[in-house]
Image (cartoon, rainbow, N blue to C red):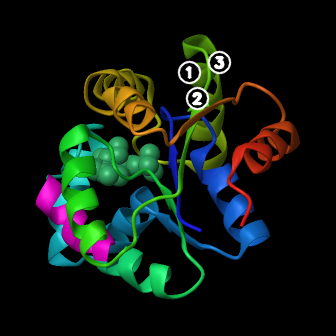
Amino acid sequence: MNVLLIGPPGSGKGTQGKRLADLLSLEHLATGDLLRAEVDAGTELGRKAEEIMADGELVPDSVIIDLVMPKVRAANNRNGYLLDGFPRSVDQAVEARRLAEEYDATPDAVIYLDVPRDELKRRILARAESEGRIDDNEETVTNRLRVFDEATAPLVDYYRDRGLLHTVDAARTEDEVTESILAVLPKT
Ligand code: AMP
């Protein structure tokens, strides 16, 4: 099974992505984590992405597509993927679908993690204390939420129109959210 997890920063994509990937034996592909690994390793890609990420903007589509699509293809040849943080715009979704169709790796379901705005800010600033991510400060968070509204939120309609979207109330406990996601996923 192939699953996409979309939601604003702080909606729990990372946490739920890890849990679902474990429970369903899927490959957890988190584009933010892949990019942070490139930054930490000091690769050319990491050097290009670092400043963009620190500002809360999106790295260019071609960079992210070249990074993630080979992994999508490989995971599809195994038990499937759990993509967290990609696509982040309709342009990325269209290009990813074109490529995924070529190797029969299109998603079976898209989960949208829905959380009210004030709860998102509270969670991200709490995470800033515990994880120390450089993009979890108040100014960058505001920008990341704006980027979400402008670039990523239109994906909700895009996937609803394709009959793939499941909206989950993600302002509840981690266990409740995981259970709701498992309940809406197609049975394999
Ligand atoms: P995340 O860990 O998903 O919150 O991602 C952290 C940052 O990585 C984002 O704010 C973006 O700068 C970058 N990023 C992650 N995924 C993507 C993507 N699909 N497209 C462009 N930039 C991305």
Magenta stretch: includes residue 33: no
Three-letter code for the amino acid on which mark 2 is drawn: Leu
**Crowd class of label 3 (few under 14; some 14 to 19; many from 20; radius 10 Å):** few
Within the image, what quadrant is residue 104 found in? bottom left
The magenta-colored residue range is: 61-69
Near-viewer residue (188 or 57): 188
Does the CB distance between marks 3 and 2 fall below 8 Å?
no
Three-letter code for the amino acid on which mark 3 is drawn: Glu
Q: Residue at x 47, y 37 (%)?
A: 136
Q: Which mark is residue 119?
A: 3
Tell me if residue 93 can be seen. yes
**Crowd class of label 1 (few under 14; some 14 to 19; many from 20; radius 10 Å):** many
Tell me if residue 46 can be seen. no
Q: Which residue is mark 1?
A: 121
Up-down: is 51 above or below 30?
A: above
In the rendered image, which quarter contains the N terminus? bottom right
Q: Residue at x 80, y 45 (%)?
A: 183
Near-viewer residue (125 or 60): 60
Q: How far is mark 1 from mark 3, CA to CA? A: 6 Å
Within the image, what quadrant is residue 170 found in? top right
Q: Position of residue 42 (x, y in %)?
A: 26, 76
Residue 51 relative to residue 29: left or right: left
Q: How far is mark 3 from mark 2, CA to CA? A: 10 Å
Three-letter code for the amino acid on which mark 1 is drawn: Lys
